[in-house]
Image (cartoon, grey):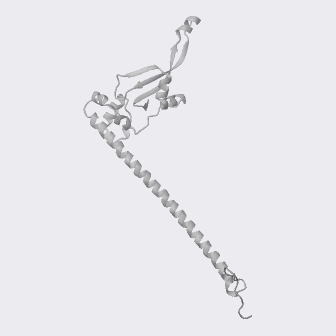
Amino acid sequence: MNSENGALVEFYTEVVQNNFKSAQEGRPIYEDHVFVRIQTPGDTRTTINRKATDQDKSRFPKSWAVFEQGLEEVTEGTPLAQWPAVSTSQVKELQHVHVRTVEQLAALSDASIQKMGPGYQRLRSDAQHWLKAAQGDAASTEAMRENEQLRDKVTLLEGQVETLKAQLEEALKSNGKGEGDGQNAKPGPGRPRKNQGK
């Protein structure tokens, strides 16, 4: 089941007997129909199973896309088993109520937490704090990555400046060699001077 819009959602195909066609043919006729299963994380008593409507498809587009592509349901987030703040028994209890990730635990409603018993309110609070801290770490990691990219660009630009500097000095030296003999000297700007000896 995918976690989407505060619910656990799964689209699936169910074979349903078509009574009208079965009566016409005199034998059982079955058709495939798309159903949706919707559950609230932390609540095992409230499960909606019904034929999927266009409204369900637009309300849960990610789950619908997974179903259409025939992909296996993928749970997004940090698996509870990988989170060090939760015990193995708590992981099993949470899986029983369809909570499989830290993100799902952090998003549980107060009503769901109360049904689960003592200790889970604190665990939900820990999950919320852990996710906030992880977001801060992600922002600092992104800043460090951007800083590294800028350093690489500066190093590249410094190399290009040094290359251009060397080329400029070489060009000035080659132009400066012919100035001493007077024949290759270029006249300055303005009108030429009159020879005063005439």
Q: Position of residue 34 (x, y in %)?
A: 51, 21
Q: Position of residue 29 (x, y in %)?
A: 56, 11
- In this rendering, is residue 198 above or below 102? below
Give 34 or 172, whichever is nearer the viewer: 172
Q: Please give the count of numbered marks on the rendered protein.
A: 0
Give 93 or 47, whichever is nearer the viewer: 47
Give 6 or 121, whichever is nearer the viewer: 6
> Where is residue 24, by image quadrant?
top right
Q: Position of residue 59 (x, y in %)?
A: 46, 28
- In this rendering, is residue 31 above or below 57? above
Give 31 or 196, whichever is nearer the viewer: 196
Left or right: 100, with 118 as reference point? right
> Where is residue 118, by image quadrant?
top left
Q: Residue at x 54, y 8 (%)?
A: 20
- In this rendering, is residue 172 above or below 135? below
Quadrant in the picture for the N terminus:
top left
Left or right: 50, with 86 as reference point? right
Q: Residue at x 46, y 23 (%)?
A: 36
**Residue extending farthest left:** 118
- In this rendering, is residue 146 above or below 128? below
Quadrant in the picture for the C terminus:
bottom right
Q: Residue at x 56, y 9 (%)?
A: 21
Left or right: 188, with 111 as reference point? right
**Residue extending farthest right:** 198
Q: Position of residue 71 (x, y in %)?
A: 52, 31
